[in-house]
Image: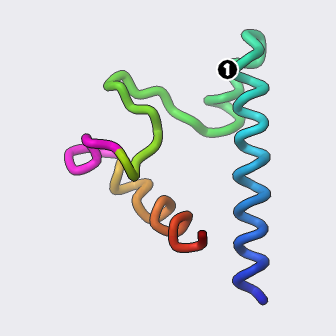
Amino acid sequence: MEDDLDKETLRKYSNETVEKFEKYYNDPEQHHKIFTELGFTCVDDGCDGFCPQCKQKQTCDLYDEFKGEWEALYRNN
């Protein structure tokens, strides 16, 4: 039961984040909120933020920081 709650909470958070990202991305006056409110970062090496399929993850300095989150996301699906 608790596992279902965690999955639902993660799903709701993910959906809300995607909705806000799309809203901010498409509105130049709110574009900065992608970085300030949603916590995204800008990396100037072609990073698209989708680590599981990234060819650079073995040498990426940031992948270790996000690895646990990606694994948890896939483990819960």
- Above or below residue 38? Residue 4 is below
Around disc 1, counting alpha carbons within 10 Å, would you say few (fewer than 14), some (14 to 19), or many (20 or more)? some
Q: Amino acid at mark 1?
A: His
* Residue on which disc 1 sits: 32
Residue farthest toward the left in the current orientation of the protein: 59
User: What is the magenta range?
Assistant: 54-62
Quarter of the image for the C terminus: give it: bottom right
Residue 13: which quarter of the image? bottom right
77 or 34: nearer the viewer: 77
Inspect the magenta stretch and tell me whether residue 45 lies in it.
no
Residue 45: which quarter of the image? top left
Residue at image coords 40%, 28%: 43
Left or right of residue 62, residue 6 in this image: right
Q: Position of residue 70 (x, y in %)?
A: 48, 59
Q: Position of residue 12 (x, y in %)?
A: 79, 57
Quarter of the image for the N terminus: give it: bottom right
